[in-house]
Amino acid sequence: MITYEEAQEIVSRYNLYIDTETIPFTDSLGRVLAADIKSDMDMPPFDKTAVDGYACRKVDLDKELVINEVIPAGVVAAMNVNPGQCAKIMTGAAIPDGADWVFMVEDAVEKSGKVRFTGTVKKDNISKKAEDIVTGDVVLKKGRVIRPQDIAVMATVGATEVEVSKKVKVGVISTGSELAEPHLKPEKGQIRNSNAYQLIAQVIRSGADAIYYGIALDTEEDTMDKISRALNECNIVLLTGGVSMGDFDFVPKVLKEAGVKIIFDRVAVQPGKPTTFCVYDKGFVFGLPGNPVSSFVQFELFVRPFIHRSMKSDWTPDIISVPLASDYTRKRAERMAWVPVIKNERSEAQPVDYHGSAHINALPDAWGLMSIGLGVKELKKGEIVDVRQI
Ligand code: AMP
Ligand code: MG
């Protein structure tokens, strides 16, 4: 059995080629930017006031000033500000010629067309032309996963069409004759299919498109039918279940018959030992364990980073080092482990009540997965542990 690090190294040798496309910036949330975006203008484009107030000359701050005009945002001043004068000005409006200072409405007493500054002289309240962005500056670098604040930057610089990576197409197949779809009440011996829907959500969160092929019954025919359709239509195919050592775990056999090459089929990780990685002419197959926690964890460890890398995203998992809240021991240590933890009020990692890889409701409250190295049987309270955010 290979180690987690060996498995990661093997997967890192394989690449999926994904093309780019140009889309309206308003549709780009969650997509991976494929070309740098440069600004077509300075920001601010002109010296502007950051407050509602009075624009004047700094040397005149101790005088009573005549108000020339009122300048709303978006309106260009009609007059210069000369000695002894000022213009009443609204936030965002351009500073009139002659003025080099704005004092706030809150620091002023206005009466009969005149105003006096009553505050203490601190700052000019002027946002200078190009202090945020200079024309030609790269404002967004390729590789980023686009967030709402990036879309504001695109709008600011007029980048209304943006180049992004196409979405990876990920097929999802559940295997197991015991599975019932969620809208059905399971009969005796059945359980609901949770993995497919969890995986679809994980795929979408990774920025890819999920295509669902349903439940493959534990027969070679049905498994082959669903796998061959998915291989044809997708870049990555995810299977859950059917990769253990059971009498009806047909997945490896069917994959081989479908022309898929299995690169590894066991990894020294817990949960998720039977994790399987395969290549075929058009893409890749990840055979994930049937137990829902294992399936979730193995997707996070192997598939999510692979999807991001395929789309040339600069995403990396968020791993935070924090102290452990209480002693932790395990009986066996021949696999690297990931244990769901919450963050307690002292920001320490506290393992959740967790009964093993079928314990699906251990995950929703978890803050992250604490990793425990190969060969490590015990960790002491206060020891620093790495928690991977989920
Ligand atoms: P398997 O790897 O097929 O032997 O499955 C291991 C365990 O995971 C069994 O208890 C299955 O019933 C369960 N399991 C498999 N697939 C799913 C699924 N899609 N949703 C929920 N549990 C599953
Ligand atoms: Mg099964």
Image (cartoon, rainbow, N blue to C red):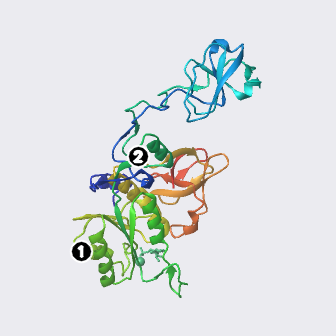
* Percent of width and height locating residue 329: 56, 56
- Label located before the other in sequence (2 or 1): 2
Q: Quadrant of ligand 2?
A: bottom left
Q: Are marks 2 and 1 in contact (CB under 8 Å)?
A: no
Q: In the figure, is residue 56 to the left or right of 139?
A: right
The disc labelled 1 sits on which kind of residue? Answer: Ala
Q: Is mark 2 within 8 Å of ligand 1?
A: no
Q: Nearer the viewer, mark 2 or mark 1?
A: 2
Callout 1: few (<14), some (14-19), or many (20+) C-alpha neighbours within 10 Å? Answer: some
Answer with the quarter of the image where residue 224 lies. bottom left
Between 108 and 110, the residue placed more toward the observer is: 110
Which residue is found at the position 47% from the left and 64% from the top? 201
Position of 311 relative to 38 (above/below): below
Q: Which mark is residue 24?
A: none
In this image, 14 relative to 196: left or right? left
Q: Is residue 337 above or below residue 198?
A: above
Query: What x and y, as percent, mark residue 120?
Result: 72, 18
In-image side of 26 versus 282 (left or right): right
Q: Is residue 270 visible?
A: no
Instruction: Determine the CA span between mark 2 and mark 1.
Output: 36 Å
Instruction: Bin the neighbour count of mark 2 within 10 Å (Cα to Cα): few under 14, some 14-19, many 20 and up.
Output: many
Residue 258 screen position, x and y as percent? 24, 74
The answer to which of 329 and 167 lies nearer the viewer is 167
Question: Which amino acid type is shown beneath numbered disc 2?
Answer: Arg
Viewer-nearest residue: 150 or 69: 69
- Residue 130 x/y as whole percent: 47, 28
Q: How many marks?
A: 2
375 or 298, nearer to the observer:
298
> Which residue is labeled 2 in the image?
144
Residue that label 1 marks: 258
